Amino acid sequence: MSDSSASSSKSAPLLSVNEVSGLFESAKKYEELNVIGTGAYGTVYKARDLLKGGQIVAMKKVKVALTEDGIPLSTLREIALLQQLGAYKHPNIVRLLDVCHGGNSLEREQQLVLFLVFEHVEQDLDSYLKRAPGPLADHRIRSMSFDILSGVDFLHSHRIVHRDLKPHNLLVASDGRVKLADFGLAKTYDKDMRLTSVVVTLWYRPPEVLLGVSYNTGVDVWSAGCVLAQLHTRTPLLPGASDSDQLHCIFRLIGRPPRAEWPENVSIVIDSFPEYPPQDFADVFPRIHPHALDLIQRMLVFDPAKRLTALDCLEHPYFTDEPLT
């Protein structure tokens, strides 16, 4: 999503708080049990659905900024899109079950509180990898990699860019299936926050975002490539300490890009970085399957136009040469 799409939403029609509240049920039908986590986009609670036999759900509390007239209709359209995606019941997407209003916040009533209710999954991929007693089996890595890319491809086919793929936003169900979470919420609620350091974990951030240029679905492919590498090593591939250090980490791995590929009109000049040669991925990942090596290398390409798409990844020999179990 480019800045132009964000600016166009500012001119969208507005709805009053009363009109918005009338579209959603009250959050009182859910009983909050405990906090699961907090992040740039809100707090997530484990909760019980009081009307459905005590079903356990995950509730994400978000605050929508209000103007004097109300909130943009575009925000509601994006929530409706998330609800429509839930109707597909895709196995690799955490389902949005409900949207409830919690009234206005107390900050001079300049924010509307909404609760997005999702299916509850017990652990995220970060916890899963930390708890694993040893290296994951090859068939498990391949299955999880396919799940992640299948979820990304589904979002992209519906013109949604996740923009924050990382182990904390990938959930592992009891049957081992991986599901994408938090898709679309940053785009919906916090357009102005997407370039701040607190939004996207540096280690999974692609070069175009670090350089501050417009981006598209290729950002998710880069982030997924970092996650796939982490499935093999159980440690982050590119643990930079700052935006600048992150770019150094990237270029030490894939090499400094040719001058012809360096984007125009960016504040960082290419000569800020040494002429790093690309590393041999076989040395970086000495014990993984050659097809997995090739897939990751073709996902971690500087020029987004030259990266594989999510669909390309699913059709890669890593997944097609042998049946998935």
Image (tube, rainbow, N blue to C red):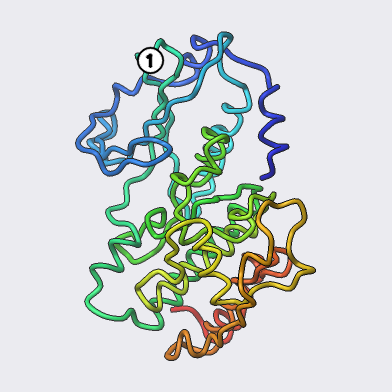
Residue at figure coordinates x 53%, y 62% from the top left: 223
Q: Relative to 123, is 166 on the left or the right?
A: right
Amino acid type indicated by mark 1: Glu
Residue at figure coordinates x 46%, y 77% from the top left: 142
Picture quadrant of residue 211: bottom right
Q: Is the residue 293 above or below the residue 106 in the image?
A: below
Residue at figure coordinates x 60%, y 50% from the top left: 161
Location of residue 280 in the rendering, given as x and y in whole percent from the top left corner: 56, 88
Tell me the crowding category of disc 1: few under 14, some 14 to 19, or many 20 or more residues within 10 angstroms, Cα based. Answer: few
Location of residue 158 in the rendering, given as x and y in whole percent from the top left corner: 64, 48
Q: Is the residue 27 above or below the residue 46 in the image?
A: above
Picture quadrant of residue 172: bottom left
Element type at marker 1? loop
Residue at figure coordinates x 31%, y 40% from the top left: 57
Picture quadrant of residue 255: bottom right
Q: Nearer the viewer, residue 54 or 260?
A: 260
Location of residue 274 in the rendering, given as x and y in whole percent from the top left corner: 61, 74
Q: Nearer the viewer, residue 148 or 242?
A: 242
Q: Is the residue 289 above or below the residue 233 in the image?
A: below
> Residue at label 1?
107
Which quarter of the rendered picture does the N terminus lie within? top right
Which quarter of the rendered picture does the C terminus lie within? bottom left
